[in-house]
Image (cartoon, coloured by chain):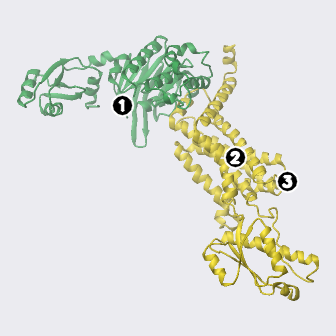
Chain colours: A green, B yellow
Amino acid sequence: MNAVSANLIGKKYGKLQALSGISLEVGEGDIFGLIGPDGAGKTTLFRILATLILPDEGTASVCGFDVIKDYAKIRKVVGYMPGRFSLYQDLTVLENLTFFASVFHTTVEENYDSVKDIYQQIEPFKNRRAGALSGGMKQKLALCCALIHEPSVLFLDEPTTGVDPVSRKEFWTMLQRLKQRGISILVSTPYMDEASLCDRIALIQNGKFLKTDTPQNIIKGFDSELWSVRSDHMSKLLSDLRLNEGVSSSFAFGDAHHVTLKNGKCNSHDLSVYLDGLKHTNVCIQKIEPNVEDCFMQLSGKNIL
Amino acid sequence: MNDFSNMTKPTAKGNWIFFMAFVRKEFHHIFRDKMSMLILLVMPILMLILFGYALNTEVKNSKVAVYDPSQDEATRAIVEKLQVNDYFVLHRMLKSPDEVDRVFKSGEVAMVVVFSEHFYESLVHGGKAQIQLIADGTDPNTANTITTYASTIINNYQQELLKTGAIPYQITPEVKLLYNPSMVAAYNFVPGVMGMIILLICAMMTSVSIAREKENGTMEILLVSPMKPLYVILSKAVPYFFLSVVNLITILLISVFVMGVPVAGSLFWLIVLSLLYIFVSLALGLLISSVVNSQMAAMLISAMGLMMPVMLLSGMLFPTENMPVALQALSDIIPARWYIIAVKKIMIKGLSVGSILTELAILGSMAIVLVTVSLRNFKIRLE
């Protein structure tokens, strides 16, 4: 039985189609990543699966329970961490944890083992108010609170947004450990680099899945050669690249532009000559391996950053 | 042991633990938020003092000037009586009628008493003497109040003359104020403030704190838990119920020991009545919280939708009898109105519980309707 399965979910907010035709399967003990920009519909999907809102179309089940009929049963077995920091800022770390333990009809002592790894990292601050914690600490506390009742499925809506890179890395290490304990995890993130840490990912944009597969397969599906192009004038470079008829796509990435070329029409040498002719200095063209973000852009045909 | 309790009575025990944890958490919120503390504990006292003293229609120590051309036994006695009274202070004697205009213009005095010439003589022989009370009409409330006081004092003097037999025949109009003979304003305001404070704390604080859970996203987590959503809401109401009881006690203590308003009737029935009213107010707060999603909206609806009508339409400040029929009908559906009427009956007039059966019945049915509607309106999901 799949931990989570959704079949052709659709949801409208007024005229806005927030989700349409969403289907997904999260296997037991899998980490399933929802990768997509803000406003893609990730939170809406989480809320439907967490029984907080009703889908307009389609069916979904969590641990075999229907999200509409058996909402009460689902609420007992899932841990949900909403996108925003949703704990009580005026309560201390320990008070928050104790409170949520009792919300889930348990105690911190009883289930200490299930949160021990994570809680130990924030234990030195247990008497500090949650509002005074750093972003990374807050997320660890929120994760503790979501785990205190030993859920079999975890819904984590953008747990690493606004968290520093070191804490982000730690957070994913924790998720891997939870996975080893057999907890199925559905996690969303706008960070493409986190995608490769999932067992399966779905690329989501404008309420639709662009593709669902393992990160490796999605990268394999990238069917053209990818070039990284740099020069001294990056913004002029981008517009010049886009004017070249031999360039099939060109997107701005951090410190370089990622470019694909039309087969047979243009190669890297042609491109170098073209850019030199436009008086670009220090032009550097390198062949690179695509990552999930490249795949996302190729699929969506649009630069999301 | 653990398994046993989980298997057989999963909800009863868990719900109770949750309930207590929630109540504790709610008190943490209240005690750690200085604003809430201020609103909850200081506001009742502040409002009582504001309404009882600052917005008082009682006028004490008003400066009075007297023009007395007669200077006889009767005028001296009347001036003496005015002077010994708390309400008046004799500012000075005027030498001529022309000065009257001047003392008012300079704002020296609040009232001038002008006696007719040969006052005592006219009173004894003609059975009639004239006295003029002049007050500053730009402040009609004060003017009205102090002239009433002065008339009462003069009437008293007339009655004394009657008793001594000095005047054979004299008709004095009898004016008597029932229940509040000295027109102590606190008698009128204490029930009103009780009605307002309780409504404010129960309805506003409950709806605002539920809205805060929605705004902060904690409601999402609470909903995605084994807790019955209804318990979430009910346990939210409990702390405010206790706080309202604390406030009720504070108000009663202040009004009895500081403001000198006694509880003339049964304290027991006053408390029963108040608990019923607290219940109605909590139900109202739950109803508001089921329709709003932000603290601001909850605050506005409570303030505009509850506070204003309570202040204006409950009969607390303005008598409902003088209102247009439409407003009177509106005031009928305001719980505070019935509560205030009933509190006045029991607390001030000292009537028995039999006299407030109507109000109890109305408040009771309001409670049933409000609880039913808010339960029906209650959402087990976010939308």
Q: Which residue is mark 2?
A: B280
Q: Quadrant of the N terminus of chain B?
A: top right
Residues at badges 1 and 2 in contact (C-beta under 8 Å)? no
In this rendered view, identify the residue nearer to me: B338 or B263. Answer: B263
Residues at badges 1 and 3 in contact (C-beta under 8 Å)? no
Q: Is residue A136 left or right of residue A276?
A: right
In this rendered view, identify the residue nearer to me: B237 or A259. Answer: B237
Amino acid at circle 2 = Val
Q: Chain of mark 3?
A: B
Q: Chain of mark 2?
A: B
Query: Quadrant of the rendered structure where residue A8 is?
Result: top left
Q: CA distance from mark 1 to mark 2?
A: 48 Å
Q: Are marks 1 and 2 on the same chain?
A: no
Amino acid at circle 1 = Lys
Q: CA distance from mark 1 to mark 3?
A: 68 Å
Can residue B380 be seen here? The reply is: yes
Picture layout, residue B188 above or below residue A294: below
- The picture places residue B108, in percent across and down from the top left corner, at 64, 72
- The picture places residue B160, in percent across and down from the top left corner, at 89, 74
Q: Chain of mark 1?
A: A
Which residue does the image show at 29% across and 24% down from the upper left? A293
Camera-nearest label, 1 or 2: 2
> What is the secondary structure assignment of the residue under circle 3?
helix
Q: Is residue B67 left or right of residue A85?
A: right
Q: Which mark is residue A208?
A: 1
Amino acid at circle 3 = Gly
> What is the secondary structure assignment of the residue under circle 2?
helix
Query: Quadrant of the rendered structure where residue B287 is?
Result: top right
Q: Which residue is mark 3?
A: B354
Q: CA distance from mark 2 to mark 3?
A: 21 Å
Picture layout, residue A288 above or below residue A232: above
